[in-house]
Amino acid sequence: MEEKQLYGALTVYRERGAYLRRLEQFEKAKAAYDEAYNNVSDDVRLLIGRSQVCADAVQPAQAYSDAELALKLEPHNMNARNMQARAMYTMSDFERSVVMNYRGARHRRQPPYFIEGINQGLETIQDCIGVNAGTVMLDFLPLIKQMEARAGSFDDDEPRKQLHVSRIPKPERKKKLTQMEARKHLTLARVLAMKYLGPMAYDKFFLQGLTEDERLKSANSAGSIALKTIVNEALRSLSKRQDMLRSQRPYYTIKLAEKAESKHQDKYKEAVLIKEREIGARTSERLLKQIEKSLRENRIMDLIAQAERMQMFLDVKTPRTLPDKETYTDRLYRAVGEGYLAQHRLSYTLSERGNRRRIAFLMGLPVGRPKSFDSVMANYPYKFIDIKQATAKVKATLEMCENSTMKCWLMYELARLLCTQKNYALAKFYAKRCQREAQEISNVTWWLNGCFVLMSGDMQQGNSNEVRIQVVEAYEFSKKMQDPERVQAFLAKCAEMAAETVTADERKAIIQRERQIVSVMDEGQAVETQVLFKRMSTVPPGRRFAVLPRKPEAVATQAERKRRRQRGLSVIPGPERTLPPSPKSDTLGFQIFDL
């Protein structure tokens, strides 16, 4: 059965769209107008109303096409002509909009839609290239010369003859922004949004942060997709509105208007800047005192949390609002380095087993459940985050970092995260870079921290020789510290533990090796090999074929029968021997029976 068509559908949907447009619900209004258009496509009021909705929703192309359709149906309709001029103005075609408004003003003076359009268009043209723009070419002449010098003597539009064409395609490399350039771009983007959008700029900032928010990804995939669509559409609408407003009044016009402010305004801005600098310096000192207090009390977890809070505070500051930002950053990460190094200490209240457990915990070795309280393990700065996401974030920050002490921290953190992921080669690379950077700025603390990351990776792999070499090097380097005894005692204990032979559980490595062997085989061979491996696992380790590469075992010095003897067997394997004959008595009729 077909659905019955609504009586008077054109009037119902058209008036519903007009009502929703007055409530500024443009999406629903456009949907109502589209429904009316599907019923009747040659209604002039419908086309003009939909053109108004599209113009208000920053969709000028649709608004212009609807107004043009209405003018084809009624060439002398002044409302349609006004909507066409508005759409041209929204599309940044200001000269043509003024011309169309002049033509409409000849036929209709009241209501003053066309007169307002003329005034608006002329003012916008004056803002772009007229009196309100000022002397743009002279004001920005140094910037124009700088851009020409960067571009060189070649014109971008001029075709260039290639002297040599390589057969190997080379990908275009985009120059990465430094930390200062990225901060300038971010600051300029926020300033432009505030200038053109006003209070709606905060909505744009919120939506930009929401696009990168991990909370949008959930198990409810349909809901996540719907939320992402809403966020992207709202951000697109705001960005398009900002671009439209910027084309109507360029940024150099706003800067010229700001220069014409009174000297009292300049004095007020200077006083605000001085006050902001004082507050920033006071806040930085307060946060640093909290960090130093946590360092003295060996509360490393609180120290790292306070350091992250101070870093967030420094991120929103610029060298203009906080002149000593570099100094505060150096002090912050020197304190963080001291905190990480303070963990590597021995406790004289713990037993020998407790100290060994502490070293194993710090070096990433497997540890059991602690039998007594350990202050280092209790205050260790755990982070319950996705380790791959944290690694990517640290890498992105390291690419834009310019402060040397902060680079040391980032490379140490990256090496530690990679070591946790068992990527020892890359962790060693970043730990060496951390040591090199620390040596350039003569920072013993970060050099030792990088050395401990290297030792952690080597101890996890069982490279005792590498650990011994690093301990000797760190022992000599630690003599530059004021009180090296604590670190030297820790290093001596690390060397002692690394020299001991540790029996490792090879079962996981064996299973992984078996999977790798099976993965390169055919399907039939893979099944047979899996069965073989399963049968091999039931054989005792001494009689089992080695799947993993291992050193040849030393030749046994004990006897062959002793070596072949198995635990729990009363009979020694070997060649079968016959029983001795039973003894016979010399007395006739009497024999000795083995009872």
Image (tube, rainbow, N blue to C red):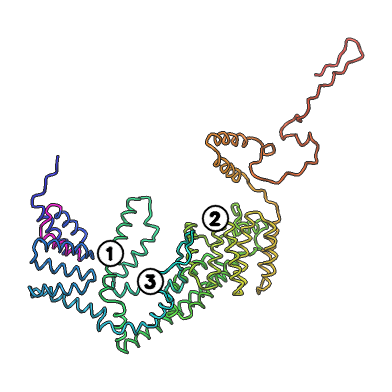
Image quadrant where one finds the N terminus: top left
314 with respect to 470 (left or right): left
Camera-near label (1 vs 3) is 3
28 with respect to 589 (left or right): left
Q: SS class of the residue under badge 3?
A: loop
Question: x, y percentage for residue 317?
Answer: 43, 75
Looking at the rendered structure, which numbered label has been put on residue 237?
1
Between residue 498 and residue 93, name the one nearer to us.
Answer: 93
Does residue 418 belong to the magenta stretch?
A: no
Most extreme residue toward the right is: 586
Tag 1 or tag 2, which sits nearer the N-term?
Answer: 1
Looking at the rendered structure, which numbered label has been put on residue 157?
none
Question: x, y percentage for residue 414?
Answer: 54, 62
The residue singled out by tag 3 in the image is 158
Most extreme residue toward the bottom is: 263
The residue singled out by tag 2 in the image is 421
What's drawn in magenta, residue-wise?
A: 38-55
Tag 3 or tag 1, which sits nearer the N-term?
Answer: 3
Between residue 476 and residue 377, name the one nearer to us.
Answer: 476
Crowd around label 3: few <14 · some 14–19 · many ≥20 (10 Å)? few
Residue at 37% over, 86% down: 271
**Cβ–Cβ below 8 Å for labels 1 and 3?**
no
Res 2 → quadrant: top left
Distance from Cα at disc 3 to Cα at disc 2 = 51 Å
